[in-house]
Image (cartoon, coloured by chain):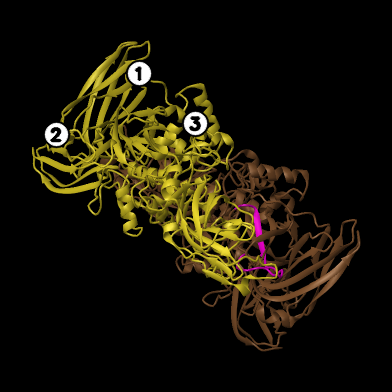
Chain colours: A brown, B yellow
Amino acid sequence: MSIPDYSDFHLGPQNGRITFAKSNSEYFDPPMFKPLDDVASPRAPSSPPFSVLGVDMRIVDNKQVHKTSRYKNSNLIVRRNKEFIIDIRFDRPFNEMQDSVDVEFLIGSSPDRNRGTSIVVSFGKVKGEMIWNCRVINKNGNEVRVGITPDPSCIVGRFSTYVTVMSNLGQQRTPKNPKTDIYVLFNPWDPADQVYMKKDEDRQEYVLNDVGVIFNGEFNNISPRSWNYGQFEEGVLDACLLVMDAGKVPLVYRGNAIKVVRQVSALMNSQDDDGVLVGNWSGDYSIGTSPTAWTGSPEILLKYARENAVPVCFAQCWVYAGVLNTFLRCLGIPTRVITNYCSAHDNTGNLKTDIMLDEEGKLNRSRTRDSVWNYHCWNEAYMTRPDLPQKFSGWQVVDSTPQETSDGLYRCGPTSVNAIKEGELSYPFDARFVFAELNSDVIYHQVDKYGKTKILSVDTAYVGKIIVTKRINANQYEDITSTYKYPEGSGRDKQVMQTAESSGLFSDDYSPPAEAGLDIQLLADTITIGDDFKLTMNIKNQSSQTCTINATISGAVVFYTGVTGTNIKLETKSATVEAWKTENLLINVQATDYMPYLVEQSNLLFLVTGSIEETGVSLSTMRTVTLLPPELTIRVSGSPRVGKAFTVIVEFRNPYNFAMENIQFRLDSPGLIPTKFKSYEQILPGGIMQYTESITPSNPGKRVFIACLDCARLRQVTNQLEINILEN
Amino acid sequence: MSIPDYSDFHLGPQNGRITFAKSNSEYFDPPMFKPLDDVASPRAPSSPPFSVLGVDMRIVDNKQVHKTSRYKNSNLIVRRNKEFIIDIRFDRPFNEMQDSVDVEFLIGSSPDRNRGTSIVVSFGKVKGEMIWNCRVINKNGNEVRVGITPDPSCIVGRFSTYVTVMSNLGQQRTPKNPKTDIYVLFNPWDPADQVYMKKDEDRQEYVLNDVGVIFNGEFNNISPRSWNYGQFEEGVLDACLLVMDAGKVPLVYRGNAIKVVRQVSALMNSQDDDGVLVGNWSGDYSIGTSPTAWTGSPEILLKYARENAVPVCFAQCWVYAGVLNTFLRCLGIPTRVITNYCSAHDNTGNLKTDIMLDEEGKLNRSRTRDSVWNYHCWNEAYMTRPDLPQKFSGWQVVDSTPQETSDGLYRCGPTSVNAIKEGELSYPFDARFVFAELNSDVIYHQVDKYGKTKILSVDTAYVGKIIVTKRINANQYEDITSTYKYPEGSGRDKQVMQTAESSGLFSDDYSPPAEAGLDIQLLADTITIGDDFKLTMNIKNQSSQTCTINATISGAVVFYTGVTGTNIKLETKSATVEAWKTENLLINVQATDYMPYLVEQSNLLFLVTGSIEETGVSLSTMRTVTLLPPELTIRVSGSPRVGKAFTVIVEFRNPYNFAMENIQFRLDSPGLIPTKFKSYEQILPGGIMQYTESITPSNPGKRVFIACLDCARLRQVTNQLEINILEN
């Protein structure tokens, strides 16, 4: 092995201590020539002088073999543990019995062989120990074709390439040339790589698909939202490396998927570390872009890079998950976006969500400190976990939404999905927090006027209702609840709770209230914002006694985070239900009740609390209703063909009696057009917005249009349209 | 249970999200009166009006029972899960069939029952669910004596106390009164507490001893340095709470010893978070106090508190360990300071320390990126680990010296000592880093002039040579190596390495060089700075062949962190050693060789590298020699008695031919005098510094004087003297 002499090695400001490089954009440029007296010794290899005329990185061919052709980047991009082939041209034929050549790959400002930041491969007479493999494939006149294979755990990032030849005169190195820089990525195709994935269809979706669907809405009404991941777009790979540089991720960590994923889960959010996205749940996004207005990741990452790592305003969970998905796929780590419906945000990790009701049955906003998010998005990343017992390899939860600090920073994971399912929560990272998001109990308390409280009822099935992700090769959702949980109430489910408790999950004791014998559910149809509607209170008597119930139904507007706003409804109802029978009571809700108070994403929370006259036993239930926004339509004129112009038309009609103002509109189509942005000052009541764009496709195949309209009074107005571009 | 109505509960700047209190110094002052119409209902308890005239916290009696009398703090200080008794005086006799009284303990700006930041205990007619226990002990006229027991996992910190009575008029609360505030601490005496410690002699040392010894020097020459922990000194407890407030440790975490220890290991150093101490290994401490000049923790913690959480300059490892020891003992967590001799600082966690030698055999400073610290100090804290399998409870390593970031912040631990010993490194926190500090191999490489390297030899026994701590009830060291490691080379030792590797410890492959058959050791006597001395190179031939060795001995000044400075010696030696025989070669080192170059703590590093003529096999070894500073003497005049003045005299003579300048001098004696500080401009060659102080003791018993003299040319000049103060 060979260590270049980097005499400017930084000892850092503290003489007594050693420091290390944390940036891929800073680099060390070694001297081009090291003369004889410094190099030679009586044992110096003697070879007639020769020098390097050129290096051909064979970019197109190598990229094809390495499955990196789709990256819009003019440099060579390779994957670990797979050979790439370069041609080196000398000024005379290379003689392997006599000549010695080193090819060096350097990363960062103080390359060091022992840290993997200086890689040297050699061919010819003098060869050292090598970490990357190197072989001469053939010689052709003055040219030598060399195959080089990065080791399967090497650092991922951008390396400078140098070629050095040794002669009687000294050591001669090629000058720095950014065109011969190479990017090395993770390699899910290679069994020796930490992120190896067996099935090709999985890799196609989780590594190479650059457009996807993120699910939102509520569990009875799962809505898709298309997202442009755009990991191959021009500048995105560099932006991803910048994220790690700005976040000071040490270069030596960047070959370890566990460390990359953990550090980047912190770097997606601006908390602590000026990461990519500023979280904002306030409803006021006037100084930036509202979280609901984005159509994809490239716009965000490129803005972050263009503005030199200033955090981008604003994000909520699906934006974090979308951008993290881009980041990981771009670096070659398989990943997907997950939505957990009814996701508990358990602030103390005690596996309880406390809902405090006042004597009337209304939610007491100031006393309710926990919340259940209507839905919450996170990512899964696929990798082995050599740091843990083998069964915990595979999908890992990673969540970059700044919900709670994990060990001091806002981040979460990677935590093994298998470990969550089995309740084995001792292992890193953040298993307890994720487990609580999926398994908390909801406890309804009533507070009387003296401040004394009692437990009304407990719902063990409300949280973690269904967990979904985009299906491979389709836009529908796949229900992956069973990868996270055993069926509620099953024997295994109880066993898991015991395992979880023995790994230090504090589950506060409470005496569960008596069984009510009645089951109440709130049912609703699909409702569009502005509709009057009826909610059905379905009361099932599951006992052998007649029950009379006196119930209060309260309603409030609610953020998707479960934090409630204005109360919009308070009504009492009574019903007598015979043994084993069911009754339905209807609750009327008028548009005028809720329209003035709606908060973003247009959710209403209804809460029923009641007591049974015959037994005095209490019961409670709640239900979030997501009101649908009016439709945004997308259509195209004619059938799109390569080389022919066609038109896409997006239309929206304001159905309300108020004017919509300061509207942001985005149209996106990965691989077809860059994100188009337009703002409108106003859409009057009944007014129509129409956006048209003429497009001439250059490649055939399936494409998707993603359109999004956003203003303060109406958010989450999106649609998508798949088209097929024909050959000409 | 009862929840006060804190209507100013902070939703934080983001309406859609909930945030939580992170400060013990901010508080919420609830209203003194809540009138009838807000409180009463037809079911209101009817009781003749009465009110609270006074609350007696019975501070002296309670403190005695809770073992907190030594804290110089006028408030009540109690420990978890132990009853304390207070007297409440009303304006008429209390009637428990009729009257309702709540005692509230509130902490932080938004107290909440569900977070443990609002504790309410009740007695009388209306009682709710209670987390802390409460009982009426007796009634005496208008006074009621109440016993209250904090729960064994409650938050540790300062609570405000309120008493509320309920009457027909409303709820009447006592005004805020800082004198009735109570501090709640961890309780190592109680089996239900997470930090329970069985033996009383252990608790006396690890919780209550406020003075100790930290070991430094080198493993052949273990030197004690007394340290004033001073956890009971006035202001220290408040300073410790301030550390957590400044570090934004959420109040809800402050009852969990794991979280407290982990967060505070980050907060002792100023990196990331403006913690207590600024690390500095540069040799230039002119803008602060040099790390070697301190005599104890109170001076540092009180300065940090006085200057409003501005980090204090400067610290190295024993200062961090000393202050963390104070912090933990002050809060009631058992702890001790550990010294690991030859502590590897493994930057990449690959279990290797690479020492790069040039062709001459000198250490190549610019190519050697790893270092072995001469010694390194950390702490152990004692606790159960409910988050881990049971066998990992007990002593936990915690290290606040900013060596490497752990999961993004400079901190380390808690990590189970048992887990380190067994090589079970999957569990949190930082087991791999600590394991490497104790178990790395030292690999000697030689770099030739072409930059090619080869491995010369490997030393598997150099690192983690001996691990010591202060003995209970004595000032000598106790060798606790066997709690961290099985004997080097034993069967269990090899098994542990396998376990460690299967928990993802990345041990780079290398082919170990051939066995040399010779063993070389460098031996030295005790040497004082300024002495000429001889080093003995002891060569043992352990083979059946005669061996001729040609060796190079190089020497350099070295920081205690293992980073080398100027080379001071380069000599070659040859010897022929017959089979099974031993030879000693002497190497002369003159004071003039090293005196001009010495760096702080006056260490020299000697490196031997040689090859055997007969076999060509290489071998290497190294040895640090710590030169002792000239003596600082402490003596007292007469025998100290309570109430009588005596004099303490500290003397130092400059034995060198240069003037010492800008000298800092400290004299400390916990429980006897506060830290005395004096600076001297100059001590001329041969000059004498004499410091005297007249003291009149007020209490009998053993005390210790700790003296320390420090200047740029001479550091680590300390001494201690134990005295016994007699009754008058």
Q: Dot 1: what SS?
A: strand
**Circle 1 Cα neighbour tier, 10 Å, few/some/many (<14 / 14–19 / ≥20):** many
Q: Nearer the viewer, residue A158 or B709?
A: B709
Residue at numbered disc 3: B421
Q: Chain of mark 3?
A: B
**Foreground tag (3 vs 1):** 3
Q: Dot 3: what SS?
A: helix
Gap between marks 2 and 3 measured at Cα: 45 Å
Q: Main secondary structure of the magenta part?
A: loop
Q: Do badges 2 and 3 share one subunit?
A: yes
Residue B592: which disc?
2
Give the residue furthest to the front: B141
Magenta run includes residue A352: yes
Left or right: where B599 falls relative to B40: left
Circles 2 and 3, Cβ within 8 Å, touching? The answer is no
Where residue B22 sits: x, y (%)?
48, 59
Name the quadrant containing residue A175. bottom left
Q: Is residue A107 visible?
A: no
Pick whichever of labels 3 and 1 is earlier in the sequence: 3
Gap between marks 2 and 1 measured at Cα: 32 Å
Q: Which residues are magenta?
A: A349-367
Residue B518: which disc?
1
